[in-house]
Protein backbone atom coordinates (compact mmCIF):
# COMPACT_ATOMS: atom_id res chain seq x y z
CA UNK A 1 0.00 0.00 0.00
CA UNK A 2 1.46 3.38 -0.96
CA UNK A 3 1.76 5.94 1.83
CA UNK A 4 -0.96 8.56 2.10
CA UNK A 5 1.56 11.33 2.76
CA UNK A 6 3.67 11.98 -0.38
CA UNK A 7 6.55 13.06 1.86
CA UNK A 8 6.84 9.50 3.09
CA UNK A 9 8.01 8.48 -0.37
CA UNK A 10 11.25 10.33 0.34
CA UNK A 11 14.16 8.65 2.04
CA UNK A 12 14.83 9.25 5.71
CA UNK A 13 18.10 11.03 4.85
CA UNK A 14 16.24 13.44 2.55
CA UNK A 15 13.68 14.30 5.22
CA UNK A 16 16.44 14.81 7.77
CA UNK A 17 18.26 17.16 5.40
CA UNK A 18 15.08 19.16 4.78
CA UNK A 19 14.45 19.48 8.51
CA UNK A 20 18.02 20.60 9.19
CA UNK A 21 17.85 23.23 6.44
CA UNK A 22 14.82 24.80 8.13
CA UNK A 23 16.11 24.70 11.71
CA UNK A 24 14.02 21.69 12.74
CA UNK A 25 15.16 18.70 14.74
CA UNK A 26 16.06 15.77 12.51
CA UNK A 27 15.44 12.92 14.95
CA UNK A 28 12.53 10.50 14.71
CA UNK A 29 10.85 8.26 12.18
CA UNK A 30 9.97 9.33 8.65
CA UNK A 31 6.39 9.95 9.75
CA UNK A 32 7.58 12.19 12.59
CA UNK A 33 9.92 14.12 10.29
CA UNK A 34 7.20 14.60 7.67
CA UNK A 35 4.76 15.81 10.31
CA UNK A 36 7.37 18.23 11.67
CA UNK A 37 7.97 19.70 8.21
CA UNK A 38 4.26 19.97 7.50
CA UNK A 39 3.56 21.72 10.81
CA UNK A 40 6.38 24.21 10.23
CA UNK A 41 5.11 24.98 6.73
CA UNK A 42 1.50 25.45 7.81
CA UNK A 43 2.42 27.81 10.65
CA UNK A 44 5.03 29.71 8.64
CA UNK A 45 4.81 33.48 8.36
CA UNK A 46 7.17 35.14 5.85
CA UNK A 47 9.51 37.81 7.13
CA UNK A 48 8.30 41.32 6.30
CA UNK A 49 10.59 43.59 4.28
CA UNK A 50 11.16 45.79 7.31
CA UNK A 51 11.92 42.89 9.68
CA UNK A 52 14.29 43.71 12.55
CA UNK A 53 15.58 40.51 14.14
CA UNK A 54 17.07 40.88 17.61
CA UNK A 55 19.25 37.90 18.53
CA UNK A 56 20.21 37.35 22.18
CA UNK A 57 23.06 35.20 23.47
CA UNK A 58 22.30 34.81 27.18
CA UNK A 59 24.64 35.24 30.10
CA UNK A 60 24.69 37.37 33.21
CA UNK A 61 28.20 38.65 32.67
CA UNK A 62 28.30 38.15 28.90
CA UNK A 63 24.90 39.07 27.51
CA UNK A 64 25.38 39.66 23.78
CA UNK A 65 22.86 41.09 21.33
CA UNK A 66 22.74 41.75 17.63
CA UNK A 67 20.03 43.45 15.59
CA UNK A 68 19.90 42.47 11.92
CA UNK A 69 17.64 43.15 9.00
CA UNK A 70 17.76 40.93 5.87
CA UNK A 71 18.64 42.58 2.57
CA UNK A 72 18.44 41.31 -1.01
CA UNK A 73 21.77 42.54 -2.36
CA UNK A 74 25.40 42.59 -1.34
CA UNK A 75 28.13 44.88 -2.65
CA UNK A 76 29.76 43.61 -5.85
CA UNK A 77 32.96 44.43 -7.61
CA UNK A 78 33.22 47.78 -9.31
CA UNK A 79 30.59 49.31 -7.03
CA UNK A 80 27.81 47.28 -8.61
CA UNK A 81 25.35 45.35 -6.47
CA UNK A 82 24.23 41.83 -7.15
CA UNK A 83 21.26 39.85 -6.00
CA UNK A 84 21.54 36.80 -3.86
CA UNK A 85 19.15 34.16 -2.64
CA UNK A 86 18.83 30.70 -1.22
CA UNK A 87 20.83 29.18 -4.06
CA UNK A 88 22.81 32.22 -5.07
CA UNK A 89 25.95 31.82 -2.98
CA UNK A 90 28.14 29.01 -1.77
CA UNK A 91 27.81 27.98 1.87
CA UNK A 92 24.80 27.62 4.13
CA UNK A 93 24.44 31.31 5.05
CA UNK A 94 23.43 32.98 1.81
CA UNK A 95 21.18 35.82 2.97
CA UNK A 96 23.05 39.09 3.56
CA UNK A 97 21.95 41.21 6.51
CA UNK A 98 22.18 44.80 7.64
CA UNK A 99 23.76 44.95 11.11
CA UNK A 100 21.96 47.64 13.10
CA UNK A 101 23.27 46.93 16.62
CA UNK A 102 25.94 44.62 18.03
CA UNK A 103 27.23 44.69 21.58
CA UNK A 104 27.91 42.82 24.79
CA UNK A 105 26.39 43.76 28.15
CA UNK A 106 27.49 42.88 31.68
CA UNK A 107 24.22 42.43 33.56
CA UNK A 108 26.18 42.06 36.79
CA UNK A 109 27.43 45.64 36.78
CA UNK A 110 25.42 45.62 38.98
CA UNK A 111 22.56 43.22 38.28
CA UNK A 112 20.16 44.99 40.63
CA UNK A 113 20.68 48.32 38.88
CA UNK A 114 20.41 48.32 35.11
CA UNK A 115 20.47 52.11 34.99
CA UNK A 116 24.01 51.79 33.63
CA UNK A 117 22.55 50.04 30.61
CA UNK A 118 20.49 53.09 29.80
CA UNK A 119 23.19 55.67 30.51
CA UNK A 120 25.89 53.80 28.56
CA UNK A 121 23.75 52.65 25.66
CA UNK A 122 25.27 52.81 22.21
CA UNK A 123 24.57 55.62 19.80
CA UNK A 124 22.64 53.24 17.56
CA UNK A 125 20.38 52.20 20.44
CA UNK A 126 19.78 55.79 21.47
CA UNK A 127 19.02 56.95 17.95
CA UNK A 128 16.56 54.07 17.47
CA UNK A 129 14.79 55.05 20.68
CA UNK A 130 14.61 58.70 19.71
CA UNK A 131 13.20 57.82 16.30
CA UNK A 132 10.45 55.73 17.86
CA UNK A 133 9.63 58.25 20.60
CA UNK A 134 11.93 61.22 21.41
CA UNK A 135 10.28 61.78 24.80
CA UNK A 136 10.80 58.19 25.87
CA UNK A 137 14.60 58.49 26.25
CA UNK A 138 14.61 60.52 29.48
CA UNK A 139 11.50 58.64 30.59
CA UNK A 140 13.19 55.24 30.34
CA UNK A 141 16.34 56.53 32.03
CA UNK A 142 14.48 58.14 34.92
CA UNK A 143 12.43 54.97 35.41
CA UNK A 144 15.60 52.86 35.64
CA UNK A 145 17.23 55.35 38.03
CA UNK A 146 14.23 55.62 40.35
CA UNK A 147 13.71 51.88 40.42
CA UNK A 148 17.32 51.26 41.40
CA UNK A 149 17.71 54.06 43.96
CA UNK A 150 16.94 51.76 46.85
CA UNK A 151 18.94 48.82 45.48
CA UNK A 152 22.23 47.72 46.96
CA UNK A 153 25.27 46.25 45.25
CA UNK A 154 25.18 42.79 43.67
CA UNK A 155 24.46 40.10 46.24
CA UNK A 156 22.60 36.86 46.68
CA UNK A 157 19.36 38.83 46.85
CA UNK A 158 19.93 39.99 43.28
CA UNK A 159 19.19 36.45 42.12
CA UNK A 160 15.93 36.06 44.01
CA UNK A 161 12.92 35.63 41.70
CA UNK A 162 11.52 39.05 42.64
CA UNK A 163 14.80 40.91 42.08
CA UNK A 164 15.65 39.12 38.85
CA UNK A 165 12.13 39.72 37.54
CA UNK A 166 12.45 43.47 38.14
CA UNK A 167 15.87 43.58 36.48
CA UNK A 168 14.61 41.60 33.49
CA UNK A 169 11.63 43.89 33.01
CA UNK A 170 13.90 46.93 33.14
CA UNK A 171 16.33 45.33 30.67
CA UNK A 172 13.55 44.60 28.20
CA UNK A 173 11.75 47.94 28.42
CA UNK A 174 14.75 50.26 28.62
CA UNK A 175 17.26 48.47 26.42
CA UNK A 176 15.86 45.80 24.12
CA UNK A 177 12.48 47.06 22.92
CA UNK A 178 13.73 50.60 22.14
CA UNK A 179 15.64 48.89 19.31
CA UNK A 180 12.18 48.27 17.75
CA UNK A 181 12.62 44.55 16.97
CA UNK A 182 9.91 42.67 15.10
CA UNK A 183 11.37 39.30 16.13
CA UNK A 184 13.38 38.41 19.24
CA UNK A 185 15.47 35.24 19.28
CA UNK A 186 16.42 33.90 22.71
CA UNK A 187 19.19 31.35 23.03
CA UNK A 188 17.79 28.13 24.51
CA UNK A 189 19.59 27.18 27.70
CA UNK A 190 20.56 23.74 28.93
CA UNK A 191 20.45 22.36 32.46
CA UNK A 192 23.57 20.22 32.45
CA UNK A 193 27.07 20.67 31.07
CA UNK A 194 28.87 17.86 29.23
CA UNK A 195 26.62 15.24 30.80
CA UNK A 196 27.57 16.19 34.37
CA UNK A 197 25.25 14.94 37.08
CA UNK A 198 25.20 18.23 38.97
CA UNK A 199 23.17 21.26 37.94
CA UNK A 200 25.35 24.31 38.53
CA UNK A 201 23.92 27.28 40.41
CA UNK A 202 25.07 29.67 37.68
CA UNK A 203 23.24 27.57 35.11
CA UNK A 204 20.03 27.86 37.13
CA UNK A 205 20.38 31.64 37.21
CA UNK A 206 20.79 31.95 33.44
CA UNK A 207 17.85 29.59 32.97
CA UNK A 208 15.80 31.87 35.22
CA UNK A 209 16.79 34.85 33.07
CA UNK A 210 15.69 32.98 29.96
CA UNK A 211 12.30 32.11 31.43
CA UNK A 212 11.72 35.66 32.66
CA UNK A 213 12.61 37.15 29.28
CA UNK A 214 9.93 34.98 27.68
CA UNK A 215 7.44 35.87 30.43
CA UNK A 216 8.03 39.63 30.14
CA UNK A 217 7.79 39.61 26.35
CA UNK A 218 4.65 37.47 26.44
CA UNK A 219 3.03 39.80 28.99
CA UNK A 220 3.86 42.94 27.00
CA UNK A 221 2.69 41.29 23.80
CA UNK A 222 -0.59 40.26 25.40
CA UNK A 223 -1.14 43.75 26.79
CA UNK A 224 -0.62 45.17 23.32
CA UNK A 225 -3.03 42.77 21.68
CA UNK A 226 -5.60 43.59 24.35
CA UNK A 227 -5.15 47.29 23.60
CA UNK A 228 -3.81 48.12 27.04
CA UNK A 229 -0.60 49.69 28.26
CA UNK A 230 0.93 47.76 31.15
CA UNK A 231 0.01 49.55 34.35
CA UNK A 232 -2.29 52.00 32.53
CA UNK A 233 -5.99 52.45 32.00
CA UNK A 234 -6.04 51.15 28.42
CA UNK A 235 -6.11 54.59 26.83
CA UNK A 236 -2.33 54.97 26.69
CA UNK A 237 -0.51 58.10 27.83
CA UNK A 238 -2.31 60.92 26.14
CA UNK A 239 -2.52 58.89 22.95
CA UNK A 240 1.26 58.36 22.89
CA UNK A 241 2.32 54.72 22.53
CA UNK A 242 5.34 53.81 24.72
CA UNK A 243 8.35 52.39 22.90
CA UNK A 244 8.08 49.20 24.96
CA UNK A 245 4.45 48.62 23.94
CA UNK A 246 5.56 45.67 21.88
CA UNK A 247 3.73 43.45 19.45
CA UNK A 248 6.25 41.06 18.02
CA UNK A 249 7.36 37.46 18.03
CA UNK A 250 9.74 35.81 20.50
CA UNK A 251 11.29 32.42 19.74
CA UNK A 252 13.77 30.04 21.34
CA UNK A 253 16.75 28.98 19.24
CA UNK A 254 18.70 25.84 20.16
CA UNK A 255 22.49 26.37 19.93
CA UNK A 256 22.97 22.76 18.84
CA UNK A 257 20.82 23.32 15.75
CA UNK A 258 22.70 26.49 14.87
CA UNK A 259 26.09 24.80 15.31
CA UNK A 260 25.06 21.78 13.27
CA UNK A 261 23.81 24.04 10.48
CA UNK A 262 26.73 26.46 10.11
CA UNK A 263 29.51 24.00 11.00
CA UNK A 264 28.19 20.50 10.35
CA UNK A 265 31.63 18.94 10.73
CA UNK A 266 32.32 20.54 14.11
CA UNK A 267 28.88 21.25 15.54
CA UNK A 268 28.47 17.83 17.15
CA UNK A 269 26.75 17.01 20.40
CA UNK A 270 29.96 17.18 22.39
CA UNK A 271 30.84 20.51 20.82
CA UNK A 272 27.74 22.29 22.07
CA UNK A 273 27.78 20.81 25.54
CA UNK A 274 30.94 22.58 26.68
CA UNK A 275 30.70 25.11 29.49
CA UNK A 276 29.95 28.64 28.35
CA UNK A 277 32.68 29.94 30.66
CA UNK A 278 30.41 32.16 32.76
CA UNK A 279 32.31 33.58 35.67
CA UNK A 280 31.40 32.53 39.16
CA UNK A 281 29.72 34.97 41.51
CA UNK A 282 32.23 34.80 44.32
CA UNK A 283 35.51 33.48 42.94
CA UNK A 284 35.49 35.49 39.69
CA UNK A 285 37.21 32.57 38.01
CA UNK A 286 35.92 30.67 35.02
CA UNK A 287 34.43 27.33 35.83
CA UNK A 288 36.36 24.26 34.83
CA UNK A 289 34.98 22.39 31.92
CA UNK A 290 33.87 18.83 32.34
CA UNK A 291 35.64 16.26 30.22
CA UNK A 292 38.61 16.82 27.95
CA UNK A 293 36.74 15.64 24.88
CA UNK A 294 33.86 18.08 25.38
CA UNK A 295 36.31 20.89 26.16
CA UNK A 296 38.37 20.29 23.01
CA UNK A 297 35.32 20.02 20.76
CA UNK A 298 33.76 23.13 22.27
CA UNK A 299 36.93 25.14 21.73
CA UNK A 300 37.02 23.99 18.09
CA UNK A 301 33.41 25.07 17.70
CA UNK A 302 34.10 28.52 19.14
CA UNK A 303 37.12 28.99 16.87
CA UNK A 304 35.13 27.76 13.88
CA UNK A 305 32.32 30.24 14.54
CA UNK A 306 34.71 33.16 14.88
CA UNK A 307 36.47 32.18 11.67
CA UNK A 308 33.16 31.79 9.81
CA UNK A 309 31.88 35.15 11.02
CA UNK A 310 35.15 36.80 10.05
CA UNK A 311 34.72 35.49 6.50
CA UNK A 312 31.12 36.73 6.40
CA UNK A 313 32.12 40.19 7.63
CA UNK A 314 34.98 40.47 5.14
CA UNK A 315 32.86 39.07 2.30
CA UNK A 316 30.15 41.72 2.60
CA UNK A 317 27.44 39.37 3.86
CA UNK A 318 27.14 41.61 6.93
CA UNK A 319 26.65 45.32 6.23
CA UNK A 320 27.22 47.32 9.45
CA UNK A 321 25.61 50.64 10.21
CA UNK A 322 27.95 53.59 10.34
CA UNK A 323 29.16 54.65 13.75
CA UNK A 324 29.51 52.42 16.79
CA UNK A 325 28.39 49.25 15.00
CA UNK A 326 30.96 49.76 12.25
CA UNK A 327 33.62 50.38 14.90
CA UNK A 328 32.62 47.15 16.63
CA UNK A 329 33.04 45.19 13.39
CA UNK A 330 36.46 46.75 12.81
CA UNK A 331 37.58 45.83 16.32
CA UNK A 332 36.24 42.29 15.91
CA UNK A 333 38.17 41.78 12.67
CA UNK A 334 41.33 43.20 14.20
CA UNK A 335 41.06 40.92 17.22
CA UNK A 336 40.31 37.90 15.01
CA UNK A 337 43.41 38.60 12.94
CA UNK A 338 45.51 39.08 16.06
CA UNK A 339 44.39 35.73 17.45
CA UNK A 340 44.87 33.98 14.13
CA UNK A 341 48.47 35.21 13.91
CA UNK A 342 49.00 34.77 17.67
CA UNK A 343 50.43 38.25 18.08
CA UNK A 344 49.96 40.73 20.88
CA UNK A 345 48.32 44.03 20.14
CA UNK A 346 50.46 46.96 21.19
CA UNK A 347 48.77 49.75 23.05
CA UNK A 348 48.61 52.95 21.05
CA UNK A 349 47.27 56.44 21.83
CA UNK A 350 43.51 56.49 21.66
CA UNK A 351 43.01 52.91 22.91
CA UNK A 352 40.83 54.21 25.72
CA UNK A 353 38.34 55.52 23.18
CA UNK A 354 38.15 52.26 21.23
CA UNK A 355 35.16 49.96 21.44
CA UNK A 356 35.65 47.09 23.89
CA UNK A 357 34.40 43.94 22.15
CA UNK A 358 34.74 41.73 25.23
CA UNK A 359 34.44 38.00 24.59
CA UNK A 360 34.49 37.36 20.86
CA UNK A 361 32.59 34.07 21.04
CA UNK A 362 29.54 35.69 22.65
CA UNK A 363 29.36 38.32 19.94
CA UNK A 364 29.83 35.74 17.20
CA UNK A 365 27.20 33.44 18.73
CA UNK A 366 24.66 36.25 18.82
CA UNK A 367 25.19 37.38 15.23
CA UNK A 368 25.45 33.88 13.75
CA UNK A 369 22.27 32.89 15.56
CA UNK A 370 20.40 35.80 13.98
CA UNK A 371 21.80 35.17 10.49
CA UNK A 372 21.10 31.44 10.74
CA UNK A 373 17.50 32.00 11.80
CA UNK A 374 16.94 34.39 8.88
CA UNK A 375 18.38 31.77 6.53
CA UNK A 376 16.10 29.11 8.02
CA UNK A 377 13.07 31.29 7.26
CA UNK A 378 14.18 31.79 3.67
CA UNK A 379 14.87 28.08 3.25
CA UNK A 380 11.43 27.18 4.57
CA UNK A 381 9.75 29.71 2.30
CA UNK A 382 11.59 28.23 -0.69
CA UNK A 383 10.68 24.70 0.39
CA UNK A 384 6.99 25.61 0.56
CA UNK A 385 7.13 26.97 -2.99
CA UNK A 386 8.87 23.86 -4.24
CA UNK A 387 6.67 21.43 -2.31
CA UNK A 388 3.12 22.87 -2.11
CA UNK A 389 1.93 19.51 -0.76
CA UNK A 390 3.29 20.63 2.61
CA UNK A 391 0.26 22.90 2.93
CA UNK A 392 -2.25 20.22 2.06
CA UNK A 393 -4.03 18.23 4.78
CA UNK A 394 -3.16 14.55 4.92
CA UNK A 395 -5.26 11.68 6.22
CA UNK A 396 -2.69 9.98 8.41
CA UNK A 397 -5.15 7.92 10.43
CA UNK A 398 -3.40 4.77 9.32
CA UNK A 399 0.07 6.08 10.15
CA UNK A 400 1.83 5.47 13.47
Image (tube, rainbow, N blue to C red):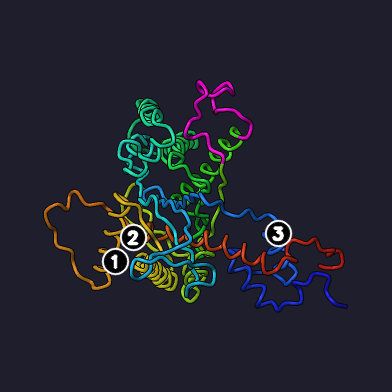
Is 253 situated left or right of 117 in this image? Answer: right
Q: Is residue 102 visible?
A: yes
Q: Position of residue 376 (x, y in %)?
A: 56, 63
Q: Quadrant of the N terminus?
A: bottom right
Q: Residue furthest left?
A: 349
Q: Is residue 160 visible?
A: no
Q: Position of residue 196 (x, y in %)?
A: 50, 62
What residue range appears in magenta? 225-247
User: Do labels 2 and 1 touch, CB within 8 Å?
Assistant: yes
Q: Quadrant of residue 344?
A: bottom left
Residue bearing mark 3: 39
Residue 336: which numbered mark, if any? 1
Mark closer to the chain start, 3 or 1: 3
Residue 274 is a magenta residue: no
Badge 1 element: helix
Residue bearing mark 2: 360
Taking the spot 36% from the left edge, 56% from the top edge, the residue there is 320
Crowd band around label 3 with a 10 angstrom C-alpha radius: few (<14), some (14–19), many (20+): few
Residue 250: which numbered mark, if any? none
Is 393 situated left or right of 307 in this image? Answer: right
Is 381 situated left or right of 79 in this image? Answer: right
Badge 3 element: helix
Majority secondary structure in the magenta region? loop
User: Is the residue 336 above or below the residue 45 in the image?
Assistant: below
Mark closer to the chain start, 2 or 1: 1
Amino acid sequence: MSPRDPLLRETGATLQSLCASCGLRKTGTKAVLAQRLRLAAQTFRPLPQDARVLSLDLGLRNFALSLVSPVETIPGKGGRRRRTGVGGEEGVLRTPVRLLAWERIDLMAPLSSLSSLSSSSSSSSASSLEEADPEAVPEAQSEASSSSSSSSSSSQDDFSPASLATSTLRLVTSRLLPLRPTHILIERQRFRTAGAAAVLEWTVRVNSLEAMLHAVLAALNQQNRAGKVLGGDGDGDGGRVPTWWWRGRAESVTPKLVAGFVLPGVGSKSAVEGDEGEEGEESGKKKKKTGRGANSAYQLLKQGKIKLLTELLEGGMVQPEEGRVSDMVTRFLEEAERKATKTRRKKVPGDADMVDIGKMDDLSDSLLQGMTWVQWQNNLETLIRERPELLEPVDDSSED
